[in-house]
Image (cartoon, rainbow, N blue to C red):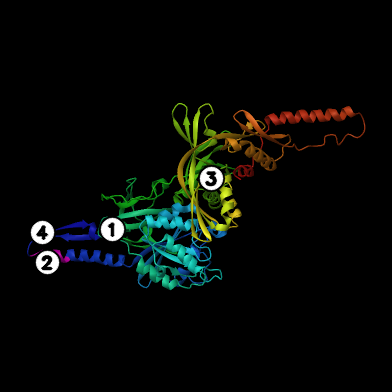
């Protein structure tokens, strides 16, 4: 007789030789192991993993509040948008980070994931969907189907998820339930009676919605008796625990004290803490197939954590889970430390924030004028703003941010192909054969009455009309192709302005197209300022430069000498504006007497300002970089 560790059954079992005398005992032990797996399967049938997806401001976070109240997880005394824990989320009224909460409801475990609605955080949505079998597609009854509704619905259907359409805000006087139901049936293959009606504000229809989740969303399909495979879909940094990793157990069982490894890095860890989130962390001794929870393994080197990685047992050989596609940032900006913020502090803050937001990337950069900093890539300008504000608030940093740029593809005359995301790396005009800029395919959902104004806006931004179709006589979906560089300025606000706030926008990247572009430098007293350079269409260079130098004149602080603001393409100045000097009246003490005394003092002042201009440094405030962005 010998004792072996059979991990398929989760513990130690006796292995006996097959003799007639020992046969009943061995079978009883095997039956115990099979019963263990059978019990895990029964528990797995009581799990439902689902997410909330919708266009921005359609009520996801409010619906999550009502679900938590209905199931008794929180009481009505809690604040609104309970899962939006970041100050920025509550201030802006948007969800930035996906949140997971585990709910006990009528013998079932419901794992709810609340996701962001803005297009810049679509990577958060895709990661959250990978941990679920179904989703609630929320649509505002007063707004109907919008651009992100279409995008998120397509994403869920591509992942073969069970989609339950939900019409929210049915209590509003302007609710158009029947019209919204027709629009939903055009994008989701469901019948009329499969669309749920709720009011996240009053709680109407929440019980029926939870019953639909249990009946229509399938339980997880993992194998409890198989070797451990867990998908890492999010993480954050805790000062005391190190990296805290969110995992979805796909196969097998993970236990406290178990030795596990990361498949991608092949680094071994010991599980120090396991648990699930029921508003607060609830430690558990084990998690089995189908469950969503968190893992603490004393990971201090945060570079070892990779979103989309597979966690398994140290001695197991398993097929890695598909994970996630590598995200490619499209908008780039440089961050430089200011005042008492050091480059090392900025680096550590970026590393910790990257653990919580894997959709941005960064690498070191060095500027002759701004010093040592980092070049950071984002999914959009809102993403840039959020990351910058989180660095300032959560880590107490002071940062200078340069104007954002996109990645250009440049074909050189020597046949080489280079990609440039920083105007300072732009090759000389004599080296360039052709330039290609990134394009996006946009989807705009708007009332038909605003269609012509939106067409004109896209035309002004070098957009190309592709197609359109009417969802109903009042609402139209229009598709355009547009240079990404035209979207990173004030495009979204202009779209809302011309449509009186009713148009919604979604976009996806659509390759590169050749364009006639040039690099425009901004010079202060004949010295180029890194971070103020732009890549712009040649035919718009003069108008853009004239507007930019006039705006910079208002934000560049006055000096003791005159400051010349110039826009240049190559060695040619195409626009100029001056910041007048601060003038001290050096003749104030002269009263009466010879005029030559006054002239002598004025000449002396003039010479002093000329000397100061040669050695003086012009202070470039953060507002100047934002003017370039605007």
Q: Residues within 10 Å of mark 4 (few under 14, many from 20)?
A: few
Label 4 or label 3, whichever comes before in sequence order: 4
Image quadrant containing the C terminus: top right
Q: CA distance from mark 4 to mark 1?
A: 27 Å
Image quadrant containing the N terminus: bottom left
Location of residue 449 by image quarter: bottom right
The disc at residue 17 is 4
Residue under label 2: 24
Furthest toward the front, the residue is 473
Is the magenta region chiefly helix, strand or loop?
A: helix
The magenta stretch spans which residues?
A: 21-28
Label 1 or label 2, whichever comes before in sequence order: 2
Could you tell whether 15 is left or right of 574 in the image?
left
**Nearer the observer, disc 3 or disc 1?**
3
Q: Residues within 10 Å of mark 3 (few under 14, many from 20)?
A: many
Q: Residues within 10 Å of mark 2 (few under 14, many from 20)?
A: few
The disc at residue 252 is 1
- Between 403 and 442, the one nearer to me in the picture: 442
Label 3 or label 1, whichever comes before in sequence order: 1
Q: CA distance from mark 4 to mark 3?
A: 77 Å
The image shows residue 238 at horizontal and vertical percentages of 45, 54
The image shows residue 474 at horizontal and vertical percentages of 53, 61
The image shows residue 294 at horizontal and vertical percentages of 39, 58
Residue under label 3: 463
**Nearer the observer, disc 2 or disc 3?**
3
Label 4 or label 1, whichever comes before in sequence order: 4
């Amino acid at each position: 007789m010998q004792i072996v560790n059979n991990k398929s059954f989760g513990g130690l079992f006796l292995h006996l030789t097959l003799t007639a005398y020992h046969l009943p005992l061995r079978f009883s032990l095997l039956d115990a192991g099979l019963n263990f797996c059978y019990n895990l399967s029964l528990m797995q049938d009581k799990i439902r993993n689902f997410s909330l997806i919708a266009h921005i401001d359609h009520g996801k976070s409010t619906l999550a509040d009502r679900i938590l109240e209905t199931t008794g997880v929180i009481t009505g005394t809690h604040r609104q948008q309970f899962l939006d824990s970041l100050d920025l989320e509550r201030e802006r009224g948007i969800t930035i980070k996906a949140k997971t909460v585990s709910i006990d409801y009528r013998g079932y475990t419901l794992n709810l994931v609340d996701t962001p609605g803005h297009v810049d955080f679509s990577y958060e949505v895709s990661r959250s969907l990978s941990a679920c079998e179904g989703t609630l597609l929320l649509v505002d009854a007063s707004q109907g189907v919008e651009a992100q509704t279409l995008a998120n619905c397509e994403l869920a259907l591509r992942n073969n998820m069970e989609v339950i359409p939900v019409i929210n805000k049915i209590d509003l006087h302007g609710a158009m339930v029947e019209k919204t139901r027709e629009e939903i049936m055009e994008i989701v293959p469901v019948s009329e009676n499969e669309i749920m009606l709720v009011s996240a504000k009053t709680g109407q229809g929440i019980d029926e919605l939870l019953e639909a989740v249990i009946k229509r969303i399938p339980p997880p399909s993992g194998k409890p008796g198989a070797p451990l495979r867990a998908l890492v879909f999010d993480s954050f940094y805790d000062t005391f625990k190190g990296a805290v990793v969110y995992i979805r157990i796909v196969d097998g069982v993970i236990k406290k004290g178990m030795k596990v490894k990361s498949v991608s890095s092949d680094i071994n860890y010991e599980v120090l803490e396991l648990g699930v989130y029921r508003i607060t962390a609830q430690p558990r001794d084990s998690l089995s197939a189908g469950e969503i929870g968190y893992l603490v393994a004393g990971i201090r080197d945060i570079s070892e954590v990779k979103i989309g990685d597979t966690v398994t047992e140290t001695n197991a050989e398993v097929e890695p889970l598909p994970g996630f596609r590598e995200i490619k940032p499209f908008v780039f900006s440089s961050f430089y430390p200011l005042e008492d913020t050091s480059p090392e502090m900025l680096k550590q803050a970026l590393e910790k924030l990257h653990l919580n937001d894997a959709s941005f990337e960064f690498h070191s950069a060095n500027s002759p004028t701004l010093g040592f900093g980092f070049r950071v890539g984002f999914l959009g300008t809102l993403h840039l703003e959020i990351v910058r504000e989180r660095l300032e608030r959560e880590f107490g940093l002071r940062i200078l941010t340069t104007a954002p740029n996109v990645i250009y593809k440049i074909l050189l005359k020597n046949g080489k192909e280079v990609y440039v995301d920083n105007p300072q790396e732009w090759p000389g005009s004599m080296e360039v054969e052709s330039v290609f800029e990134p394009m996006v395919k946009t989807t705009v959902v708007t009332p038909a009455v605003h269609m012509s104004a939106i067409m004109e806006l896209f035309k002004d931004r070098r957009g190309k009309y592709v197609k359109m179709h009417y969802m109903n006589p009042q609402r139209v979906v229009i598709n355009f192709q547009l240079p990404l560089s035209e979207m990173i300025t004030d495009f979204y606000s202009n779209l809302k302005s011309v449509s009186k706030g009713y148009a919604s926008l979604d976009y996806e990247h659509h390759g590169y197209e050749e364009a006639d572009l040039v690099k425009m430098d901004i010079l202060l007293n004949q010295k180029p300022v890194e971070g103020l350079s732009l890549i712009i269409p040649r035919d718009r260079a003069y108008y853009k430069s004239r507007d930019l130098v006039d705006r910079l004149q208002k934000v560049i602080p006055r000096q003791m000498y005159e400051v010349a603001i110039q826009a240049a393409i190559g060695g040619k100045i195409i626009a100029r504006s001056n910041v007048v000097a601060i003038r001290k009246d050096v003749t104030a003490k002269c009263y009466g007497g010879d005029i030559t005394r006054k002239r002598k003092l004025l000449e002396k002042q003039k010479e002093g300002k000329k000397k100061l201009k040669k050695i003086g440094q012009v202070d470039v405030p953060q507002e100047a970089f934002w003017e370039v962005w605007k």
